[in-house]
Amino acid sequence: MFQKTKNKSSIDQLGQTNRIVDQTIIKGNIEAVADLRFDGLLEGNLKVNGKVVIGPLASIQGSIICQNADVEGVVKGTLYVEELLHIKEFARVEGEIVVGKLAVEPGGKLDVSCKMLGDHMAEPSLLTQNATPNVVELVQENKVTTKKKK
């Protein structure tokens, strides 16, 4: 009748998505081990061990660190995306970006300094080489790790 519950590891979280709905206001930092869809307002930093989707009504002011990101709303700050950053048609991004790959749909607005690392993500020295102080601080504070590409 009663079953034991066990703690879920990050492996158990695969395929699950966290969701912050519109009209939610968060002032502070968010860390998530699973994918995240964000449709609210964030004044702070976001660190996700997976994919982030920034919805069309969302606004984020702060740093974002993740593996992949789709942006439909507004982001002002520093983005570190290990793999693909996809800027959708009505998105607006201001600040700095460090990405593996970048895709921008027609209509997407970018006002950023951009560092594209591509296949060099495995070389940690390239993360901060010629980077602005904001990117260097973001990488050092969050101990950003890079995957070695085969």
Image (cartoon, grey):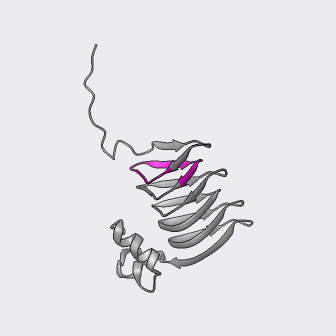
Q: Residue at x 45, y 44 (%)?
A: 15
Visible residue check, residue 137: yes
Q: As drawn, which residue projects farthest toward the right?
A: 107
Q: Position of residue 129 (x, y in %)?
A: 41, 85
Q: Is residue 72 above or below residue 144?
A: above
Furthest toward the bottom, the residue is: 130
* Figure check: 120 above or below 89: below
What is the x, y in percent for residue 128? 40, 80
- 48 sits to left or right of 72: left
Residue found farthest to the front: 27
Q: Quadrant of the N terminus?
A: top left
Res. 21 image quadrant: top right
Q: Do we see residue 149 in this rendering? A: no
Q: Position of residue 38 (x, y in %)?
A: 55, 49
Residue at 52% from the left image edge and 43% from the top image edge = 19
Q: Decide which of 83, 140 is in the foreground and name it.
A: 140
Q: Residue at x 37, y 74 (%)?
A: 122
Majority SS type along the magenta span: strand
Within the magenta stretch, is there residue 149?
Answer: no
Q: Which residues are magenta?
A: 27-42
Is 59 above or below relative to 120? above
Closer-to-camera residue (62/146): 62
Q: Nearer the viewer, residue 95 or 32?
A: 95
Residue 132 sits above or below residue 88 on the image: below
Looking at the image, how many numbered discs can be counted on the residues? 0
Image-based side of 13 in relation to 79, left or right:
left
Does residue 38 belong to the magenta stretch? yes
Residue 137, x across and y down, in percent: 39, 73
Q: Quadrant of the C terminus?
A: bottom left
